[in-house]
Image (spheres, rainbow, N blue to C red):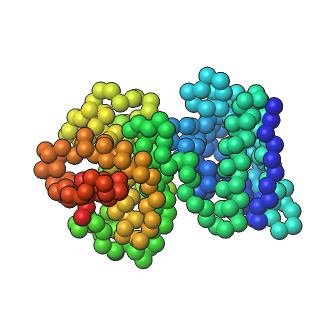
Amino acid sequence: MAFDKTVFLPLDPESVFELVTQPERMRRWKTVAARIDLRVGGEYRWTITPGNSAAGKLTRVESGKELTFTWGWEGSGDLPPGASQVSITLEGVTGGTNLRLVHSGLNAEQEIGHAEGWNHYLDRLVALATDGSVEPDPWAAAPDPIDALTSAEASLAIAQRILRGVKQEQLGNSTPCPEFSLAQLIDHQYGSLCLIAAGLGVEIPAKTLDNFEVRLADLAQTTIEKFRARGLEGLITLRENTLPAAFVARLLNIELAVHASDIAIATKQDLGISPILAEYILGLARETVVPEVRADGRFGPEVKLPADAPSLDRLLAFTGRG
């Protein structure tokens, strides 16, 4: 069986091709993280929602006209990578482009599930192409089941969106971290990610980019992939400190989510974090920011709040934000 749908997008075919192939564009409507080797035989890996990554190989690539690739889910016994095929064809028409997506090689049950997914994401693609923006994907907001790595992917989705909204003229703004301007805080967040990435053996790019979102997204995706491959057992060395891998994963969540909140406050953006995700990261923070960690100055004193305060407020208060 196959899913087959055509949608109209008010953009020229080359612009639509970028929306369906460029990671920076894809993160706006379809993926939490994306990498793609855009050539015949090239591989891709798209984290669609936290904990759910599709992968395969490109079989046809014609800019502005067609993209065809094999499709499957990492860790799936029923539909592993390469088990089905997706074809996207673009036809320039008056006022825009008709995009036709055909997903073949599915059984009846798989067709039902993928139809729900493709309808959801094609609607988001149409909204982005029409309005220039789209609301955060509710499907990525609260992983189920949730663990330290799926929550890190959900936090990454938020951090990327917030960084995307930073304007150049805001870089001198003050932040909830008194020692950092906004520009310094963004560099600090990236530097913390570099430290964790290096501990996992990820090669750090020699040259940074002016695009803060792309800089964070590219390194974070590789870092989380490496974490998934090694698991949360054993030890990781961060500079001179050897720490449990589970501790480092918890720290990754805090660096992504809490600093995303700091940046959102400094730029007057809505963080848009799910209470479920905030509550989970608060639990990770309570395991991580123990008295000896707080004593070294990385976190300010806990600000006391009522137990029934919103999850995000309690997370920020626990990490020293007033």
Q: Position of residue 129 (x, y in %)?
A: 69, 63
Q: Residue furthest right?
A: 94
Q: Which quadrant would the C terminus be assigned to in this image?
A: bottom left
Left or right? Give the position of 232 relative to 237.
right
Question: What residue is shown at x 42% (from left), y 44% (from top)?
Answer: 152
Q: Position of residue 238 (x, y in %)?
A: 26, 40
Is 238 placed above or below 97 here? above
Quadrant of res 223: top left
Residue 212 seen: no
Left or right? Give the position of 28 relative to 156.
right
Is 284 placed above or below 263 here? above
Question: What residue is shown at x 41% (from left), y 47% (from top)?
Answer: 277
Residue 102 seen: yes
Q: Residue furthest top?
A: 77
Left or right? Give the position of 281 relative to 244.
right
Q: Position of residue 118 (x, y in %)?
A: 70, 45
- Tell which of 280 and 26 is nearer to you: 280
Question: What residue is shown at x 31% (from left), y 54% (from top)?
Answer: 308
Question: What residue is shown at x 70% (from left), y 55% (from top)?
Answer: 123
Q: Which quadrant would the N terminus be assigned to in this image?
A: top right
Is 62 placed above or below 321 here? above
- Tell which of 2 and 93 is nearer to you: 2
Q: How many numbered marks does the figure carry?
A: 0
Q: Position of residue 279 (x, y in %)?
A: 36, 47
Left or right? Give the position of 273 relative to 29.
left
